[in-house]
């Protein structure tokens, strides 16, 4: 490549037909051709070898193509095709210097490269300069005729030839005026055009359809250099604004945008080298396709690494981004605008299609971020709904109104968020996310409703349980004829209160009638279930209840005072009354009677089977009667209402009697023992006999008081033994048990008394020193004996009462006082 201040050139195609892609790309970058769009022109020159083509271009466009050195001989100077930028001409104009035709270096038969280069020039150039000698005009065997035939022939290989300006430059003009030369030249051109074989479609196509023919004449450069330069300078002015209407190439067609010129030229040459027909329209589409794809890929890569987009993408992963749609739309607009600016001159159909593809790729790139944003908006909206919904409920707002208002508010909030996230270029549907949010909100409402209803139901069930359990237990404990009517009344009252309260509470939930009726019915069933469960629980403890009732009635009188069995009570009647009350309890607990129309005769059946049958069996054991309790169900009573079956009642009654018979026998024993204790004195006749028969002995005692003292001492000893042995208490349980108990306690008690007396006798008594020892001894013995005996008696048994001890002490100490 050769460079100068004003122009730079490069060999586009070498003599062997190799395309210099690197060189042209470098040239295009240096001259910044890609920025020109469609505002550029391509000029090429062809003509015989050594006809001054390079010289003309250098003077006409200020290029620096290599020129022939006339002093070295006439030979080939330009090999292949060279490309340069015209200096100082607007718009940007590229000029191609083609290898000369009819050169001896390639030979007479090697015309392939000539035709290929001619076709290439016609395919890429807007203006083709044909350099020809003036003296060849009008001659049949002129050097320019083969060239023109070549131009017209290769033109037929273009499927849709572009409109090209052919400028014939007549070199070394003679004195013949141009006005006389031009008609002859045009006539020769027309003859050549007519003689060239054409496709059927262009049989009648005039030359002007494909070419604009211009003719200029220049003086000889060697003989009239100054005049030549003046003419060239005048001709140069015609290349300024050559592509504007009225210019040399004002009506050109099928122009490739400047950014695609390099690729287009390379592909055209490739097709020409492969000796294929050159379809310029298809080539134009192909170039547009490749370049638009390149531009789109460049912009896509630039967008993917764009700092603003990367920040948005990163931020939207963790939380919603305010103004996401506007920000991203602005970024997309800028990149699409850049694409439009660079691809604006390419085929519109291709450009638009690639733009759509580019836009789709961008949207595919940003769609995950958009979906992530929608997910954040949905999640935040759902959390917001939960917060405002809970706040509304805690504020006492009705459930249905709260759910409706909060739903409308949050859906509107979601729609605002979606509107803020919407990207102008994308017609993405957010209805699926909205529907999911709707389902999530509905699911949360349903869950809260279920929880509230469960909480409400549990509240009223707890109230029912508290209101029914205790009273029902108390009513069943005091079983009577009015027990079940009272329970029914209690159940009805509490159930109605609970159902009324629950119904009022449910009115705020906007439930359908069927669900409401079902819940109220469930509450009624629960209340009934509480009573039945309590009844079954109490039925499981009926034996204990019966024993407690029997014990209460049997052991306490009508004033609820503990009963003392003095011997006057009618134990049989008391037992019968207590057992009847226990039987009443069993009859009440046998079945549930929660229905108003319930009627049964269980108490009568139990009475006949358990009480009267027992009495009858005593009277007549030979008669075998039917046992009404030999069944697992009660007559006319549903098994569901049965708490205690007839067979169980019979078994319970048998166990009840066996466990209460001991209490009755104890009462009878206590009564008999009381009678014996109250009648310990002998009969009156025995007392009279003792007085009459013992009169002499009584008189003897009066005559001899010593005997009376001995008897008194014996009485005291007997009284002490009586108290210590608790003889009256031992005989309360019967004579034989009392004798056995006394026989085991008598000897130890006597030995204990004697031991105490001995110990007291051995202790020295504190004496007065002025008193006679004999007197002291006389006064010490009674007191010592009294004290020793009293201490011995009190220590001999821990079971004696304090009252008895005081009586014994006073009785024993009285003789000492008398002394």
Image (cartoon, rainbow, N blue to C red):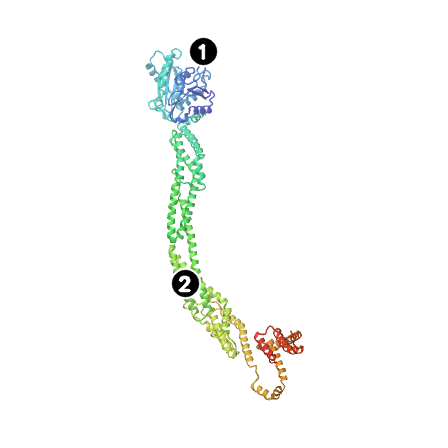
Residue 364 image offset from top left, x and y in percent: 43, 38
Question: Which residue has dot 2 on it?
Answer: 495
Please name whichever residue, 348 or 277, is drawn nearer the observer in this view of the structure.
Answer: 348
Residue 310 in sight from this viewpoint: yes
Q: Quadrant of residue 164?
A: top left
Residue 548 x %, y %: 50, 70
The answer to whether one can see residue 609 in this image is no
Q: Residues within 10 Å of mark 2 (few under 14, many from 20)?
A: many
Instruction: Depth check: give the residue in front, 505 or 789.
Output: 789
Q: Residue 315, how many percent across, how many down?
A: 44, 39
Nearest the viewer among 690 and 779 is: 779
Q: Is residue 386 above or below residue 810?
A: above
Q: With 138 as the anchor, is 672 left or right in this view?
A: right
Of the two numbered discs 1 and 2 in the rendering, the one whose residue sits closer to the viewer: 2
Dot 2: what SS?
helix
N-term mark: 1 or 2: 1
The C terminus, quarter of image: bottom right
Query: Which of 12 and 35 lies nearest the eye of the viewer?
Result: 35
* Distance CA(mark 1)–CA(mark 2): 133 Å
In the picture shown, does residue 532 fall above or below 427? Answer: below
Q: Is residue 687 left or right of residue 449?
A: right
Q: Which residue is mark 1?
A: 71
Circle 1 packing at 10 Å, graded few (<14), some (14-19), many (20+), is few
């Amino acid at each position: 490549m050769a460079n100068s201040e004003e122009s730079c050139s490069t060999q586009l195609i070498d003599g062997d037909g190799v395309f210099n892609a690197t060189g042209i790309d470098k040239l295009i970058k240096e001259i910044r051709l890609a920025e020109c769009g469609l505002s550029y022109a391509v000029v090429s020159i062809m003509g015989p070898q050594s006809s001054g083509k390079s010289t003309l271009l250098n003077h006409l466009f200020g290029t620096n193509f290599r020129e022939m050195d006339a002093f070295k001989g006439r030979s080939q100077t330009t090999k292949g095709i060279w490309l340069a930028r015209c200096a100082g001409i607007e718009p940007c104009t590229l000029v191609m210097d083609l290898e000369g035709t009819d050169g001896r270096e390639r030979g007479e038969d090697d015309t392939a490269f000539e035709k290929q280069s001619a076709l290439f020039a016609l395919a890429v150039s807007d203006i083709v300069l044909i350099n020809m000698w003036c003296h060849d005009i009008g001659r049949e065997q002129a050097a320019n005729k083969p060239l023109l035939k070549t131009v017209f022939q290769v033109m037929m290989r273009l499927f849709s030839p572009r409109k090209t300006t052919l400028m014939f430059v007549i070199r070394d003009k003679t004195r013949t005026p141009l006005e006389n030369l031009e008609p002859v030249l045009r006539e020769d051109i027309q003859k050549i055009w007519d003689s060239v074989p054409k496709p059927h479609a262009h049989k009648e196509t005039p030359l002007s359809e494909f070419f604009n023919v211009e003719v200029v004449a220049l003086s000889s450069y060697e003989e009239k250099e100054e005049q030549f330069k003046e003419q060239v300078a005048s001709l140069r002015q015609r290349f300024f604004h050559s592509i504007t209407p009225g210019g040399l190439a004002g009506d050109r067609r099928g122009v490739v945008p400047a950014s695609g010129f390099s690729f287009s030229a390379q592909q055209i040459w490739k097709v020409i080298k492969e000796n294929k027909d050159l379809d310029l329209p298809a080539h134009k589409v192909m170039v547009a396709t490749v370049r638009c794809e390149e531009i789109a890929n460049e912009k896509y890569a630039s967008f993917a690494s764009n700092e603003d987009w990367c920040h948005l993408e990163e931020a939207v992963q963790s939380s919603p981004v305010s103004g996401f749609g506007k920000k991203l739309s602005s970024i997309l607009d800028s990149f699409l605008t850049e694409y439009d600016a660079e691809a604006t001159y390419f085929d519109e159909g291709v450009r638009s299609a690639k733009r759509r593809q580019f836009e789709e790729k961008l949207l595919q790139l940003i769609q995950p971020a958009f979906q992530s944003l929608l997910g954040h908006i949905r999640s935040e909206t759902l959390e917001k709904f939960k917060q405002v919904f809970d706040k509304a409920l805690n504020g006492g707002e009705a459930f249905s109104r709260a759910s409706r208002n909060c739903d409308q508010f949050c859906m509107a909030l979601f729609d605002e968020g979606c509107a803020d996230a919407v990207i102008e270029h994308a017609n993405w549907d957010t209805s699926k996310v909205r529907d999911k949010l709707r389902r999530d909100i509905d699911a949360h409402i349903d869950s809260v409703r279920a929880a509230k209803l469960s909480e409400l139901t549990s509240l009223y069930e707890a109230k029912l349980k508290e209101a029914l359990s205790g009273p029902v237990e108390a009513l069943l404990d005091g079983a009577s004829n009015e027990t079940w009517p009272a329970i029914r009344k209690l159940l009805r009252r509490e159930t109605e209160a609970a159902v009324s309260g629950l119904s009022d509470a449910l009115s705020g939930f906007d439930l359908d009638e069927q669900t409401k009726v079902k819940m109220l019915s469930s509450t009624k069933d629960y209340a009934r279930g509480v009573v039945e469960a309590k009844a079954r629980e109490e039925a499981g403890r009926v034996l204990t209840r019966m024993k407690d009732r029997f014990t209460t009635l049997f052991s306490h009188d009508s004033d609820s005072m503990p009963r003392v069995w003095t011997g006057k009570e009618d134990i049989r009647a008391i037992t019968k009354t207590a057992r009847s009350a226990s039987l009443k309890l069993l009859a009440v607990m046998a079945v549930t009677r929660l229905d108003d129309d319930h009627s049964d005769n269980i108490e009568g059946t139990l009475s006949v089977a358990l009480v009267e049958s027992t009495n009858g069996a005593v009277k007549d054991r030979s008669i075998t009667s039917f046992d009404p309790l030999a069944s697992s169900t009660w007559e006319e009573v549903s098994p569901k209402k049965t708490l205690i079956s007839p067979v169980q009642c019979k078994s319970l009654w048998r166990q009840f009697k066996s466990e209460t018979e001991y209490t009755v026998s104890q009462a009878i024993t206590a009564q008999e023992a009381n009678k014996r204790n109250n009648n310990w004195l002998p009969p009156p006749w025995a007392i009279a006999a003792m007085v009459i028969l013992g009169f002499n002995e009584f008189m003897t005692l009066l005559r001899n008081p010593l005997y009376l003292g001995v008897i008194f001492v014996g009485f005291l000893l007997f009284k002490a033994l009586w108290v210590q042995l608790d003889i009256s208490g031992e005989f309360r349980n019967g004579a034989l048990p009392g004798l056995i108990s006394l026989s085991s306690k008598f000897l130890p008690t006597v030995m204990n008394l004697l031991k105490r007396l001995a110990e007291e006798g051995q202790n020295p008594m504190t004496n007065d020193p002025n008193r006679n020892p004999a007197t002291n001894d006389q006064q010490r013995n009674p007191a010592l004996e009294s004290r020793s005996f009293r201490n011995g008696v009190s220590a001999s048994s821990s079971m004696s009462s304090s009252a008895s001890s005081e009586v014994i002490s006073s009785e024993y100490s009285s003789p000492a006082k008398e002394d």
